[in-house]
Amino acid sequence: MWIIFALLATIFFGARGIMYQWTSQKKLNRNLLLFGVFFVGFIISISGVILLDQQWYGWADVAVGLALGVGSFAANAFLHKGFSVGKASVISILSGLTPLFVLVFAFLLWNETLSSLQLLGFFIIFGGLYIIRYSNDISLTNLQGAQWGLLAALFFAFNDLLGKQSTLLEADTFATLTSMFGFGSFLFAMNWIVKRKSGVADEHDARSDWSEIKTFSCGLLIGLTNVAGMVAIISAFAIGNTGLVSAISGMNILIILLYSRIILKESFTRQELFGLTTAFIGVIVLRLSY
């Protein structure tokens, strides 16, 4: 059952990625957009707490949720910074290292181990994703901004591990997400307000031609896929292996790739086709291991 939740997370995060890709081509305020993304997550999560009579059972539950908020805020900020100063292909490769970090830390923290077949499936999936991300022209001279991509990968891994930790604490899902999205909303809102009042903005924000209402509303729409993805991945973490769930959810890049080829009419390179096929073979191997 965990693989179904993980694949749902892949679909939802893939849809989020498509909308991020589309909005990245628009002139809008990124902090305000992400404030909207997190705010709708907060509203849905607090509604889930009320309707399902969920609660926080202790400070540990609250702390994990707040840490998730910090991690999500940092991961998005570092990824945005990386794309703004470095080559996109390099940043993508490094940010795609998240499943590998999760696998290592899950072993160190919880002594999670994989069977030989599961380990093979993991590395097949990871190898497929890496081939896809590596399909662009990359050289050692194109590493500007690499540190931001690496930091983004580390914080996304940090989020996956915290999501797993919340299930180990048997924390209620919507209570955890309320803390996460609430604190993340606060951080993005404060960042937007401070820059707005001080008149400080990055180059992209400075030439924004989207109204604040339009930008925030777009963020609310994107946030629906984000909160659905978080519910799915935490559900997967509750019953599945941390490293495997992270690896499968990382396949959302395949959905974004299909979108860019089918909708944007871009053709597949030989490496991308090979990576796509490899990743799906990895999923089949994982499925056969259970």
Image (tube, helix red, strand yellow):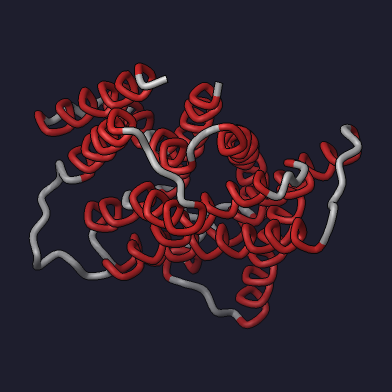
Residue 37 position in % (x across, y down): 63, 48
Report the number of numbered marks.
Answer: 0
Closer to the camera in the image, 154 or 194: 154
Q: Residue at x 45, y 34 (%)?
A: 14
Is residue 65 in sight in this rendering?
yes
The part of the image, by quadrant, that contains residue 287 is top left
Q: Residue at x 30, y 36 (%)?
A: 119
Closer to the camera in the image, 202 or 58: 58
Q: Residue at x 34, y 60 (%)?
A: 83
Question: Does residue 186 lie above or below 165 as drawn?
Answer: below
Question: Does residue 157 lie above or below 288 as drawn?
Answer: below
Residue 267 position in % (x across, y down): 17, 26
As drawn, the residue found furthest toward the bottom would be 198
Quadrant (top left, top right, bottom left, bottom right) of the C terminus:
top left
Q: In the picture provided, is 212 more to the left or to the right than 251?
A: right
Closer to the camera in the image, 184 or 290: 290
Q: In the picture provided, is 30 more to the left or to the right than 94?
A: right
Q: Residue at x 71, y 62 (%)?
A: 183
Question: Does residue 254 lie above or below 39 as drawn?
Answer: above
Residue 265 position in % (x across, y down): 25, 25
Quadrant (top left, top right, bottom left, bottom right) of the N terminus:
top right
Is residue 21 in sight in this rendering?
no
Residue 16 position in % (x across, y down): 51, 38
